[in-house]
Amino acid sequence: MPDASGAEWSVLRPPTGPTIPLNRLAPEAALRRLELTIVRRLEGFLHGDHLGLLPGPGSDTNDARVYQPGQDDVRKMDWAVTARTTVPHVRDTMADRELEVWALLDVTPSMNWGTEGVTKRDLGIAAIATVGFLSQKMGDRFGGMMMLPDRVKRLPGRSGRTALYGLLRKMLTEPIVPD
């Protein structure tokens, strides 16, 4: 519904009918359900990729600074700034960085309970899927770790939708450890 300024706003409401817990669905159906819900709710909230923190070779421009003869490459001359200021300027670039995202899922017996419809484990997988789908959209690697009662199982970081689905499938199909 539009507000006083004419902007469109939509209100997110919880589902009204009965929901099926993720652990009762086939892994593929559970993953499709998570992705559709997450993408539908987050579409339009994110704009742009992340920049690196260090200067270096890259495609994203940073600030312009005064040209230092003998130190700066003439090919990096910013002619628009030079024309405006009448002083030679060069444009520094910001290095593009690839982010590697890691998530930890607790699959100890303490995660086997929750409300009637959803366990804490299901909520954990849904949260990891949210972060995973966002990072996958930007081309970043996504890896995970599962904290079992006796050890930590590492799932290597990979990029792409297929790799993310594989990681989430492993988390969904990990056997439930009884109390």
Image: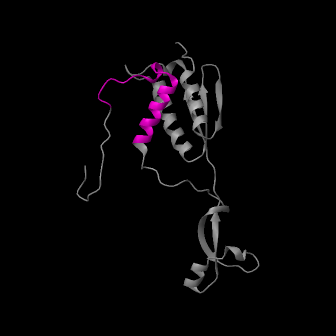
Residue 11 horizontal side relative to residue 149, left or right = left
Residue pushed farthest right? 70
Instruction: Specify the farthest residue to the bottom.
Output: 86
The quarter holding residue 103 reads top right
Counting from the top left corner in percent of width and height, residue 11 is at 30, 43
Q: Is residue 34 magenta?
A: yes
Residue 111 drawn at (x, y percent) = 49, 22
- In this view, the residue in front, 162 or 20, is 162
Which residue does the image show at 42% across and 44% down from the upper left?
A: 42
Quarter of the image for residue 90 reads bottom right
Question: In the rendering, at what x and y percent does residue 41 appear?
Answer: 40, 41
Colouring scheme applied when the structure was drawn: one colour
Secondary structure mostly seen in the magenta stretch: helix
Q: Is residue 91 left or right of residue 16?
A: right
As drawn, 164 above or below 120? below
The structure residue drawn at horizontal position 29% and vertical position 56%, both measured from the top left corner, is 7
Q: Is residue 97 magenta?
A: no
- Which stretch appears magenta? 15-40
Which of the 4 image quarters holds residue 16?
A: top left
Q: Residue at x 44, y 31 (%)?
A: 33
Q: Is residue 176 above or below residue 131?
A: above
Q: In this rendering, is residue 10 above or below 129?
A: below
Q: Give residue 53's position: percent from left, percent from top.
A: 62, 57
Numbered circles on residues, count: 0
Residue most toward the left?
A: 4
